[in-house]
Image (cartoon, helix red, strand yellow):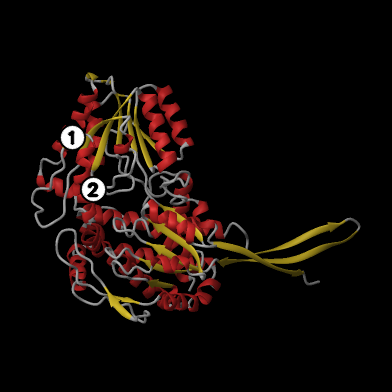
């Protein structure tokens, strides 16, 4: 069983180097090219997805006491797939029964299994992309990247950190204590990694793999069994993941039930019962602040890792590339119709305007420049469809309708042309004053943005940072030409626990997060209590336990 570790050791070593250097690196190509994945990979992936439709999703030997499935593509059709379902007690019992052999395996064995799983997931990235498109509404290119290689990157990152932490302590050592003129005391000491127990990974609707893989693979690598609880509207991507994990597990001599699927139906979710079960030792959760608060308050003694939500901000003080700035912000507002936890919502602009390479721009000029850049980006319906995708949840459309009354409309939201059967919406941009906190100081998930008039750049930075401290923020962006203002803002956002991007005007956007380099969420404000992925994210998923005895004479 150690063969997988040796086979994938170069990938692990490169990942360990990457997280130390924090430079760009990825073993999983993000380009959906037949030259990389195979000439027929795209067609094979689509065929594999279509073969799932209208059929039971078979997980060999998985506990099953019924079947559920009500997924409907944001692009229109129902998937018609049903999944095995079982009671919480049945799932917990199966998970605990599978735990012993997995927990007792050497860290290298578990890590090797995880690396093989990730390799197989990568090989099926086209199938996964189609599953993500039709459960989240992401356009294909984004679904391929975020649902496939980028999610796999985050999984590998967690495995690398787990391996580093598990091997920090040697498996054994000889302990010698001098006794002056007497003979030294010599002890034989052994240490082993002991997992916490049953882990729950609670997935979200919009990024079912990207947000779930870090916790899933961190728990697996450190010897915990995992029950994967998908969002009822996005089961398929995680069901495919569970299928592959179970196949590799059995091939390597472990019980398939080291990973289980906890599928449920809308309105009959079993999430709370799973979280509150006394056998659950670890909970990974992605979703709203309201349910995140409930999870943290009701998980008992379990270790809880959350990525929740917040109000992300951009502060514009000055720029030497006004057109580039507007284009960059426009793409950030439009990408996946603002349905990203990193998407900006509030854009703070001085009432008196800003200085730019095009001369002085008034507050209205800045707002109009951003709106015009959105219009230009989305003028081509094909490109608009590829950038915006579809709306995952119908509630987002209702939220847009309500938001129209919250400020002066600078740019109205509209459906994406050519996607008549899909739920779609382009960005709604509203102008408000800093005093209108009832409008912009709450998270309004979706393609809704506020251009907020403030006194000056310092006022904008402070308001954005205070929002992060009260409501949570995952990202912030700043446009400034004064270095002292940049450094002051960096200090202020660090104190608020927010990752800051400065003067983005090219092909990198505030709502993008790169594995092996960017820490996603800090765990230092209400947007989440953990960071993807750092040592703290993995180290508390296991304990180091010793046994010792006097060394043989």
Label 2 environment density (alpha carbons within 10 Å; few <14, some 14–19, many ≥20): some
Give the alpha-carbon distance from disc 2 to disc 1, as whole Å: 15 Å
Marks 2,1: beta carbons within 8 A: no
Task: Name the mark on residue 409.
Answer: 1
Task: Name the mark on residue 96.
Answer: none
Q: Does residue 344 show up?
A: yes
Residue 202, percent from left and from top: 39, 62
Taking 142 as reference, is 549 left or right? Answer: right
Q: Quadrant of residue 427?
A: top left
Compared with 284, 260 (above or below) is: below
> Residue at the spot x=42%, y=35% of the render?
466
Q: Quadrant of residue 251?
A: bottom left
Q: Does residue 252 show up?
A: no
* SS assignment at label 1: strand
Residue 168 versus residue 6: which sits nearer the camera? 168
Whichever of callouts 2 and 1 sits on the residue coming sooner in the sequence is 2
């Amino acid at each position: 069983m150690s063969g997988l570790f040796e086979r994938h050791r170069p990938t692990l070593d490169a990942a360990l180097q990457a997280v130390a250097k924090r430079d760009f690196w990825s073993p999983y190509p993000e380009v959906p090219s037949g030259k990389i994945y195979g000439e027929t990979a795209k067609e094979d992936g689509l065929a594999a997805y279509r073969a799932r439709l209208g059929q039971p999703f078979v997980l060999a030997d998985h506990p099953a006491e019924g079947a559920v499935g009500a997924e409907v593509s944001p692009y229109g059709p129902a998937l018609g797939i049903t999944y095995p379902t079982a009671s919480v007690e049945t799932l917990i019992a199966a998970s605990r029964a599978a735990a012993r052999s997995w927990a007792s395996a050497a860290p290298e064995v578990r890590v090797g299994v995880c690396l093989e799983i990730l390799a197989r997931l990568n090989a099926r990235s086209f199938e996964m992309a189609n599953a993500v498109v039709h459960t989240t509404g992401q356009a294909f290119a984004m679904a391929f990247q975020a649902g496939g290689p980028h999610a796999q990157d985050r999984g590998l990152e967690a495995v690398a950190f787990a391996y580093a932490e598990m091997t920090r302590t040697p498996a054994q050592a000889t302990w010698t204590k001098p006794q002056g003129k007497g003979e030294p005391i010599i002890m034989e000491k052994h240490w082993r990694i002991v997992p916490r127990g049953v882990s729950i990974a609670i997935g979200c609707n919009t990024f079912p793999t990207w947000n779930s893989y870090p916790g899933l693979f961190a728990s697996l690598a450190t010897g915990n069994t995992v029950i994967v609880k998908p969002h009822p509207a996005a089961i398929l991507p995680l069901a495919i993941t569970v299928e592959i994990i179970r196949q590799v597990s059995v091939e390597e001599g472990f019980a398939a039930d080291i990973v289980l699927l906890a599928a449920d139906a809308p309105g009959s979710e079993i999430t709370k019962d799973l979280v509150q079960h006394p056998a659950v030792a670890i909970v990974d959760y992605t979703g709203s602040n309201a349910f995140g608060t409930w999870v943290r308050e009701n998980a008992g003694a379990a270790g809880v890792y959350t990525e929740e939500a917040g109000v992300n901000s951009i502060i514009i003080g000055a720029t030497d590339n006004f057109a580039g700035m507007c284009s960059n912000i426009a793409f950030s507002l439009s990408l996946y119709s603002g349905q990203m936890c990193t998407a900006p919502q509030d854009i703070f602009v001085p009432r008196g305007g800003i200085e730019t390479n095009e001369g002085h721009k008034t507050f209205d000029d800045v707002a109009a420049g951003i709106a015009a850049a959105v219009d230009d980006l989305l003028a081509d319906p094909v490109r608009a469809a590829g950038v915006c995708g579809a709306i995952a949840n119908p509630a987002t459309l209702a939220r847009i309708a309500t938001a129209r009354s919250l400020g002066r409309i600078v740019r109205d939201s509209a459906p994406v042309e050519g996607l008549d059967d899909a739920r779609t919406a382009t960005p709604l941009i509203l102008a408000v004053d800093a005093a209108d906190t009832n409008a912009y100081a709450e998270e309004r998930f979706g393609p809704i943005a506020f251009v907020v008039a403030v006194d000056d750049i310092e006022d904008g930075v402070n308001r954005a940072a205070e929002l992060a401290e009260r409501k949570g923020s995952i990202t912030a962006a700043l446009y400034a030409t004064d270095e002292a203002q940049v450094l002051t803002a960096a200090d202020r956002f660090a104190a608020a626990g927010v990752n800051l991007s400065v003067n983005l005007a090219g092909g990198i956007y505030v709502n993008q997060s790169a594995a092996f380099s960017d820490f996603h969420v800090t765990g230092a404000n209400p947007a989440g209590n953990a960071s993807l992925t750092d040592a703290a994210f993995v180290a508390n998923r296991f304990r180091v336990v010793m046994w010792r005895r006097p060394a043989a004479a």
